[in-house]
Image (cartoon, rainbow, N blue to C red):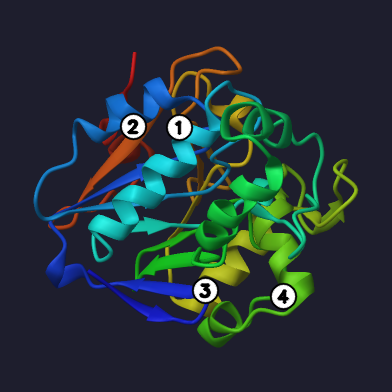
Amino acid sequence: MFESRNKLAVIQSDRVKRILVFGDIHGDLFSLEKGLRHWKPGDLLLFLGDYADRGPNGVEVIERILQLKEKYPERVLPLKGNHEDYSVDGKPLFAPCTLIQEASHRRGSWAVFFKTLYAFITRLYLSAIIPGQILFVHGGIGNQIDSIDDLVNPERALIDEILWSDPGKDDGLRPNFRGIASVFGPDISEKVLSRLALRYVVRSHQPRKAMGGPSVEHNGKVITLSSTAVYGGVPFILILNMDKLPEDEKDFRECTVFLD
Protein backbone atom coordinates (compact mmCIF):
# COMPACT_ATOMS: atom_id res chain seq x y z
CA MET A 1 0.00 0.00 0.00
CA PHE A 2 3.04 2.26 0.25
CA GLU A 3 6.58 2.39 -1.04
CA SER A 4 9.34 2.79 1.51
CA ARG A 5 11.96 5.40 0.61
CA ASN A 6 14.13 5.53 3.72
CA LYS A 7 12.35 8.01 6.03
CA LEU A 8 9.56 8.77 3.52
CA ALA A 9 6.58 6.55 2.76
CA VAL A 10 4.96 7.08 -0.65
CA ILE A 11 1.35 5.95 -0.56
CA GLN A 12 0.31 3.98 -3.64
CA SER A 13 -3.08 5.44 -4.46
CA ASP A 14 -4.12 2.58 -6.74
CA ARG A 15 -3.67 0.02 -3.94
CA VAL A 16 -5.57 1.82 -1.17
CA LYS A 17 -9.33 2.29 -0.83
CA ARG A 18 -9.30 4.59 2.19
CA ILE A 19 -6.80 6.06 4.62
CA LEU A 20 -7.66 6.32 8.32
CA VAL A 21 -5.54 9.17 9.68
CA PHE A 22 -4.92 9.41 13.44
CA GLY A 23 -3.50 12.51 15.09
CA ASP A 24 -1.80 12.53 18.51
CA ILE A 25 -3.05 9.67 20.72
CA HIS A 26 -1.02 10.37 23.88
CA GLY A 27 -1.91 7.21 25.78
CA ASP A 28 -5.64 7.35 24.99
CA LEU A 29 -6.20 3.64 24.32
CA PHE A 30 -9.98 4.04 24.37
CA SER A 31 -9.97 6.48 21.45
CA LEU A 32 -7.47 4.36 19.53
CA GLU A 33 -9.70 1.30 19.80
CA LYS A 34 -12.77 3.30 18.78
CA GLY A 35 -10.93 4.54 15.72
CA LEU A 36 -9.82 1.03 14.78
CA ARG A 37 -13.46 -0.05 14.55
CA HIS A 38 -13.64 1.87 11.27
CA TRP A 39 -10.71 -0.04 9.74
CA LYS A 40 -11.77 -2.29 6.84
CA PRO A 41 -9.99 -4.48 4.29
CA GLY A 42 -8.34 -2.25 1.72
CA ASP A 43 -7.81 0.56 4.24
CA LEU A 44 -4.45 1.98 5.30
CA LEU A 45 -3.91 3.02 8.91
CA LEU A 46 -1.78 6.17 9.11
CA PHE A 47 -0.61 7.48 12.48
CA LEU A 48 0.97 10.94 12.86
CA GLY A 49 2.98 10.22 16.03
CA ASP A 50 2.90 11.00 19.77
CA TYR A 51 1.56 7.66 20.94
CA ALA A 52 2.38 7.93 24.65
CA ASP A 53 2.82 10.44 27.51
CA ARG A 54 0.11 12.70 28.96
CA GLY A 55 -2.54 9.93 28.97
CA PRO A 56 -2.69 6.78 31.11
CA ASN A 57 -2.10 3.98 28.60
CA GLY A 58 0.95 4.82 26.53
CA VAL A 59 2.42 1.36 27.03
CA GLU A 60 -0.70 -0.33 25.70
CA VAL A 61 -1.05 2.09 22.78
CA ILE A 62 2.52 1.42 21.63
CA GLU A 63 2.16 -2.33 22.06
CA ARG A 64 -1.14 -2.30 20.17
CA ILE A 65 0.21 -0.38 17.19
CA LEU A 66 3.38 -2.48 17.15
CA GLN A 67 1.21 -5.61 17.17
CA LEU A 68 -0.82 -4.29 14.24
CA LYS A 69 2.32 -3.34 12.33
CA GLU A 70 3.80 -6.80 12.79
CA LYS A 71 0.57 -8.53 11.71
CA TYR A 72 -0.32 -6.17 8.85
CA PRO A 73 2.96 -4.53 7.76
CA GLU A 74 1.55 -3.24 4.46
CA ARG A 75 -1.61 -1.80 6.01
CA VAL A 76 -0.16 0.09 8.99
CA LEU A 77 1.94 3.22 8.53
CA PRO A 78 3.10 4.90 11.76
CA LEU A 79 5.03 8.18 11.65
CA LYS A 80 7.39 9.55 14.26
CA GLY A 81 6.37 12.35 16.60
CA ASN A 82 8.54 14.37 18.95
CA HIS A 83 7.47 12.01 21.77
CA GLU A 84 9.19 9.16 19.93
CA ASP A 85 12.55 10.93 19.90
CA TYR A 86 14.95 9.03 22.19
CA SER A 87 18.67 8.43 22.38
CA VAL A 88 19.83 4.85 21.86
CA ASP A 89 20.20 4.37 25.62
CA GLY A 90 16.60 5.33 26.36
CA LYS A 91 16.90 9.00 27.28
CA PRO A 92 14.00 11.11 25.96
CA LEU A 93 14.93 14.11 23.83
CA PHE A 94 11.78 15.90 24.98
CA ALA A 95 9.99 16.68 28.24
CA PRO A 96 7.96 15.72 30.12
CA CYS A 97 8.16 11.97 29.52
CA THR A 98 5.59 10.16 31.65
CA LEU A 99 6.09 6.91 29.74
CA ILE A 100 9.22 6.03 31.74
CA GLN A 101 7.34 5.90 35.03
CA GLU A 102 4.36 4.18 33.44
CA ALA A 103 6.46 1.48 31.77
CA SER A 104 8.55 0.90 34.89
CA HIS A 105 5.39 0.30 36.87
CA ARG A 106 3.59 -1.87 34.32
CA ARG A 107 6.42 -3.79 32.65
CA GLY A 108 8.91 -4.13 35.49
CA SER A 109 11.60 -1.73 34.30
CA TRP A 110 12.17 1.01 31.77
CA ALA A 111 15.17 -0.86 30.34
CA VAL A 112 13.02 -3.90 29.57
CA PHE A 113 10.23 -1.89 27.95
CA PHE A 114 12.64 0.32 26.02
CA LYS A 115 13.74 -2.72 24.01
CA THR A 116 10.16 -2.96 22.75
CA LEU A 117 9.93 0.79 22.27
CA TYR A 118 13.23 0.98 20.41
CA ALA A 119 12.11 -1.74 18.02
CA PHE A 120 9.03 0.40 17.40
CA ILE A 121 10.61 3.83 16.96
CA THR A 122 13.40 2.63 14.66
CA ARG A 123 10.72 1.55 12.17
CA LEU A 124 8.87 4.86 12.13
CA TYR A 125 8.79 7.08 9.07
CA LEU A 126 9.20 10.84 9.35
CA SER A 127 6.73 11.71 6.61
CA ALA A 128 4.34 10.24 4.08
CA ILE A 129 2.86 11.59 0.88
CA ILE A 130 -0.01 10.95 -1.46
CA PRO A 131 1.74 12.07 -4.67
CA GLY A 132 0.27 15.26 -6.03
CA GLN A 133 -1.97 15.70 -3.01
CA ILE A 134 -1.03 15.52 0.68
CA LEU A 135 2.08 15.64 2.88
CA PHE A 136 1.61 13.92 6.24
CA VAL A 137 3.96 14.88 9.10
CA HIS A 138 3.80 15.13 12.86
CA GLY A 139 4.71 18.78 13.38
CA GLY A 140 5.45 20.82 10.30
CA ILE A 141 7.76 21.76 7.49
CA GLY A 142 10.00 24.75 8.15
CA ASN A 143 11.69 26.13 5.02
CA GLN A 144 14.40 23.54 4.38
CA ILE A 145 12.48 21.27 2.03
CA ASP A 146 13.46 21.87 -1.58
CA SER A 147 12.47 18.51 -3.04
CA ILE A 148 11.15 15.07 -2.21
CA ASP A 149 14.75 13.91 -1.76
CA ASP A 150 15.00 16.07 1.35
CA LEU A 151 12.21 14.00 2.91
CA VAL A 152 13.90 10.75 1.91
CA ASN A 153 17.20 11.61 3.63
CA PRO A 154 16.50 14.50 6.01
CA GLU A 155 19.26 16.32 7.84
CA ARG A 156 18.91 16.69 11.62
CA ALA A 157 17.75 20.30 11.32
CA LEU A 158 14.90 19.24 9.04
CA ILE A 159 14.03 16.34 11.34
CA ASP A 160 13.58 18.87 14.15
CA GLU A 161 11.28 20.96 11.95
CA ILE A 162 9.20 17.93 10.98
CA LEU A 163 8.85 16.81 14.61
CA TRP A 164 8.51 20.17 16.38
CA SER A 165 7.44 23.08 14.17
CA ASP A 166 4.01 24.74 14.20
CA PRO A 167 2.04 26.84 11.72
CA GLY A 168 1.60 30.52 12.55
CA LYS A 169 -0.47 33.41 11.24
CA ASP A 170 2.38 35.64 10.06
CA ASP A 171 4.51 35.08 6.97
CA GLY A 172 8.08 33.88 7.30
CA LEU A 173 9.78 31.90 10.04
CA ARG A 174 9.78 32.87 13.71
CA PRO A 175 11.33 31.25 16.81
CA ASN A 176 9.14 28.58 18.37
CA PHE A 177 8.16 28.90 22.04
CA ARG A 178 9.13 25.23 22.38
CA GLY A 179 12.78 26.25 22.10
CA ILE A 180 13.35 24.12 19.02
CA ALA A 181 12.38 24.39 15.35
CA SER A 182 10.21 27.26 14.09
CA VAL A 183 6.77 28.72 13.61
CA PHE A 184 6.19 28.81 9.85
CA GLY A 185 3.87 31.18 8.05
CA PRO A 186 1.37 30.80 5.19
CA ASP A 187 4.01 31.82 2.64
CA ILE A 188 6.28 28.98 3.78
CA SER A 189 3.48 26.44 3.37
CA GLU A 190 2.76 27.82 -0.10
CA LYS A 191 6.43 27.62 -1.17
CA VAL A 192 7.14 24.15 0.22
CA LEU A 193 3.96 22.60 -1.15
CA SER A 194 4.73 24.12 -4.54
CA ARG A 195 8.26 22.68 -4.47
CA LEU A 196 6.86 19.24 -3.67
CA ALA A 197 3.96 19.50 -6.14
CA LEU A 198 1.53 18.85 -3.26
CA ARG A 199 -1.63 20.63 -2.10
CA TYR A 200 -2.00 20.10 1.67
CA VAL A 201 -0.11 19.42 4.88
CA VAL A 202 -1.93 17.16 7.36
CA ARG A 203 -0.31 17.19 10.80
CA SER A 204 -1.00 16.81 14.53
CA HIS A 205 1.34 18.02 17.34
CA GLN A 206 -1.14 20.59 18.73
CA PRO A 207 -4.15 18.67 20.09
CA ARG A 208 -5.52 21.70 21.90
CA LYS A 209 -5.85 23.46 18.55
CA ALA A 210 -8.14 20.71 17.24
CA MET A 211 -10.34 19.83 20.21
CA GLY A 212 -13.58 20.22 18.26
CA GLY A 213 -12.52 18.98 14.84
CA PRO A 214 -9.83 19.75 12.28
CA SER A 215 -8.05 23.10 12.56
CA VAL A 216 -7.60 24.53 9.07
CA GLU A 217 -5.00 27.25 8.49
CA HIS A 218 -2.83 28.85 5.84
CA ASN A 219 -5.60 29.40 3.31
CA GLY A 220 -6.86 25.86 3.75
CA LYS A 221 -3.48 24.23 3.13
CA VAL A 222 -2.54 23.10 6.67
CA ILE A 223 -4.87 20.80 8.61
CA THR A 224 -4.27 19.84 12.26
CA LEU A 225 -5.80 16.71 13.83
CA SER A 226 -6.27 15.35 17.36
CA SER A 227 -7.17 11.76 18.23
CA THR A 228 -6.84 12.07 22.00
CA ALA A 229 -9.21 13.11 24.76
CA VAL A 230 -6.49 13.77 27.34
CA TYR A 231 -6.73 17.54 26.85
CA GLY A 232 -10.52 17.58 26.72
CA GLY A 233 -12.59 18.04 23.60
CA VAL A 234 -13.68 15.26 21.28
CA PRO A 235 -11.03 13.12 19.54
CA PHE A 236 -11.46 12.28 15.87
CA ILE A 237 -9.83 10.71 12.85
CA LEU A 238 -9.95 11.53 9.16
CA ILE A 239 -11.18 8.89 6.74
CA LEU A 240 -9.92 9.79 3.27
CA ASN A 241 -11.51 8.05 0.29
CA MET A 242 -8.84 7.65 -2.35
CA ASP A 243 -11.33 7.95 -5.21
CA LYS A 244 -12.46 11.36 -3.91
CA LEU A 245 -9.81 13.14 -1.87
CA PRO A 246 -10.69 16.43 -0.14
CA GLU A 247 -10.66 19.58 -2.25
CA ASP A 248 -11.30 22.20 0.42
CA GLU A 249 -11.96 22.83 4.11
CA LYS A 250 -15.57 21.65 3.80
CA ASP A 251 -14.42 18.32 2.35
CA PHE A 252 -11.89 17.79 5.16
CA ARG A 253 -14.61 18.39 7.73
CA GLU A 254 -16.88 15.90 5.97
CA CYS A 255 -14.07 13.31 6.23
CA THR A 256 -13.98 13.75 10.02
CA VAL A 257 -15.19 10.87 12.21
CA PHE A 258 -15.55 11.76 15.89
CA LEU A 259 -14.61 9.14 18.49
CA ASP A 260 -17.02 10.15 21.26
Tag in front: 3 or 2:
2
Could you tell me which residue is drawn at 33 percent across and 39 percent down?
252
Q: Which residue is mark 2?
A: 253
Is the C-beta separation of discs 1 and 2 under 8 Å? yes
**Vertical comparison of 85 with 207: above or below:** below
Residue holding disc 1: 214
Residue 204 locus on image (x, y percent): 55, 42
Alpha-carbon distance for marks 1 and 2?
7 Å
Residue 80 can be seen in this image: no
Which amino acid is tagged 3? Answer: Ser
Question: Marks 4 and 2: in contact by CB < 8 Å?
Answer: no
In the image, taking residue 250 as reference, residue 204 lies left or right, namely right
User: Where is mark 3, residue-wise?
Assistant: 194
At x 65% / y 62%, what residue is drawn? 141
Quick one: label 2, few (<14), some, or many (20+) residues within 10 Å?
some
Residue hosting label 4: 144
* Residue type, mark 2 in image: Arg
Does the image show residue 86? yes
